[in-house]
Amino acid sequence: MATPEERLTIVVPDATAVSGVYARPAVADASIVVAHGAGAGMDHPFMVGFTRAMNGLDVATLRFNFPYMEAGRRSTDRAPVAVAAWRAAFAAAAARAAEGEPVWASGKSFGGRMASMAVAEGLPAAGLVFLGYPLHPPGKPERARDEHLYGIQVPMLFLRGTRDPFASTEVLEPVLAKLGPRATYHEVEGGGHSFEVRGRKGDPRETGAALAPIVADFMRAQVGT
């Protein structure tokens, strides 16, 4: 049986109020807040597939829009606005979690990078899950977006397609080495930035759902560590 979903309005200080979708299975041992990528909102099939699969694995989820997406703009929010949205969405999920329940932060591409910036600024997430971290613009490995990562002390899971142009191996490997045991890496062979595999027809819902067991196992492995 599908987990019932609750649509929310999340107030973001000094910005547009945004929409969210919260779902909590009958038994939940953790929560995860998930932000969308730059070009598609919280109801993109990848986001829906991933969060619903997490619900099936006994994890509560909250996916949400950033203010620019809510307002129908193409340009992403500046970091302070995006981080404020993250704080508001995280607070909404934490308020619905059981006492002592770990609440994680995750995101697709831009959403994950903004999650990491929020955590670097003090967001009390139990850990971070990156669904395709945009480490650098395609073809520009010299413009790495990694400096803030080194101050983060919570566990981080980096999921990456091996063909992802936003995270070349030669840039990613030194970053993971510098992060040490805080970082765990999982790759999808042949996957692009959205984990699509060239030459293989796939529903984005199924693509997102396929990542959920990896994420849920990682989250549970951190309990007590």
Image (spheres, rainbow, N blue to C red):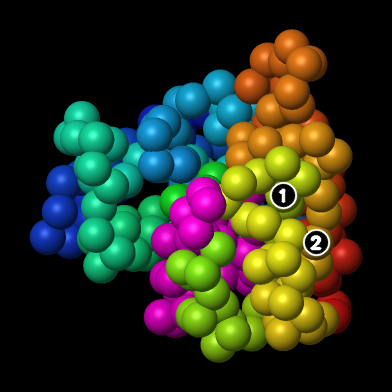
**N-terminal-most mark, 2 or 1:** 1
Quarter of the image holding residue 68?
Answer: top left
Residue lying furthest left in this view?
14
Count of numbered marks: 2
If the image is split into quadrants, where does the C terminus sit?
bottom right
128 in the magenta segment: yes
- Separation of residues labelled 2 and 1 (CA atoms): 8 Å
Q: What residue type is labelled 1?
A: Arg
Magenta region, residue range: 113-140
Quarter of the image holding residue 121?
Answer: bottom left
Can I make out residue 159 in this image? yes
Q: Residue at x 87, y 65 (%)?
A: 221
Q: Residue at x 39, y 34 (%)?
A: 39
Locate residue 143 relative to residue 99 in the image: left or right: left
If the image is split into quadrants, where does the N terminus sit?
top right
Do residues under tags 2 and 1 come within 8 Å of each other at their CB atoms?
yes
Instruction: Determine which residue is flagged by label 2.
Output: 185
Percent x, y of residue 48? 57, 27
Can I make out residue 57 in this image? no
Classed neighbour count for the residue bearing mark 2: other residues with Cα under 10 Å, few (<14), some (14–19), many (≥20) = few
Percent x, y of residue 180? 78, 83
Q: Nearer the viewer, residue 175 or 5?
A: 175
Q: Which amino acid does label 2 sit on?
A: Tyr
Q: Which residue is drawn at 47% across and 54% down?
A: 137
Q: Which mark is residue 148?
A: none
Q: Which residue is drawn at 66% across and 68% down?
A: 171
**Label 2: element kind:** strand
Instruction: Determine which residue is flagged by label 1.
Output: 160
Percent x, y of residue 215? 77, 50
Locate residue 46 relative to residue 173 in the image: left or right: left
